[in-house]
Image (cartoon, rainbow, N blue to C red):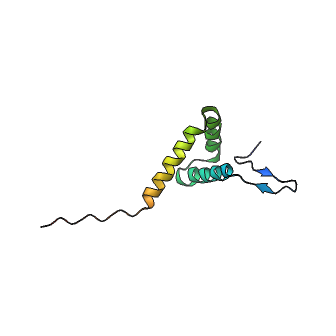
Amino acid sequence: DEGLVCPARTPTNIRLYSEKDIRRVLWIRHLTRDRGVNLAGIRILFELEERLGARILEALYQEGMAAEESASEPTPEPTPEPV
């Protein structure tokens, strides 16, 4: 049974993580920490990704990252109206 991330390995068995592997790890972290998805659910999502194509999950990832960024930005103070 393979893991959720399967990096390449050197002849001396050192793991080599690609940019795709790193994005996948960040996506897993987002789903588990921020969305409450367990690892079994993530495995199902990745199986769906293989069937439906990466575009759907990439769009969800971008949407989630945009939501995180907007949530971390301070909201501007309302401008007082003249009396």
Which residue in the rendered view is the most extreme toward the right?
11
- Residue that appears at 66% across and 48% down: 20
- Residue that appears at 76% across and 54% down: 16
In the image, is 77 to the left or to the right of 56? left
Which residue in the rendered view is the most extreme toward the front?
19
Return the residue nearer the eye: 47 or 60.
Answer: 60
Total numbered labels placed on residues in the image: 0
In the image, is 47 to the left or to the right of 15? left
Quarter of the image containing the C terminus?
Answer: bottom left
- Vertical placement of 48 versus 39: above or below? above
- Residue that appears at 55% across and 50% down: 36
In the image, residue 1 lies at what x, y percent?
Answer: 77, 42
Which residue in the rendered view is the most extreme toward the top?
51
In the image, residue 35 lies at what x, y percent?
Answer: 53, 50
- Vertical placement of 43 versus 22: above or below? above
Which residue in the rendered view is the most extreme toward the left?
83
Q: Quadrant of residue 77?
A: bottom left
- Vertical placement of 47 versus 67: above or below? above
Return the residue nearer the eye: 1 or 61.
Answer: 61
In the image, is 67 to the left or to the right of 47? left
In the image, residue 14 lies at what x, y percent?
Answer: 82, 57
In the image, residue 49 lies at what x, y percent?
Answer: 62, 37
- Residue that appears at 56% across and 43% down: 58
Q: Quadrant of residue 33?
A: bottom right
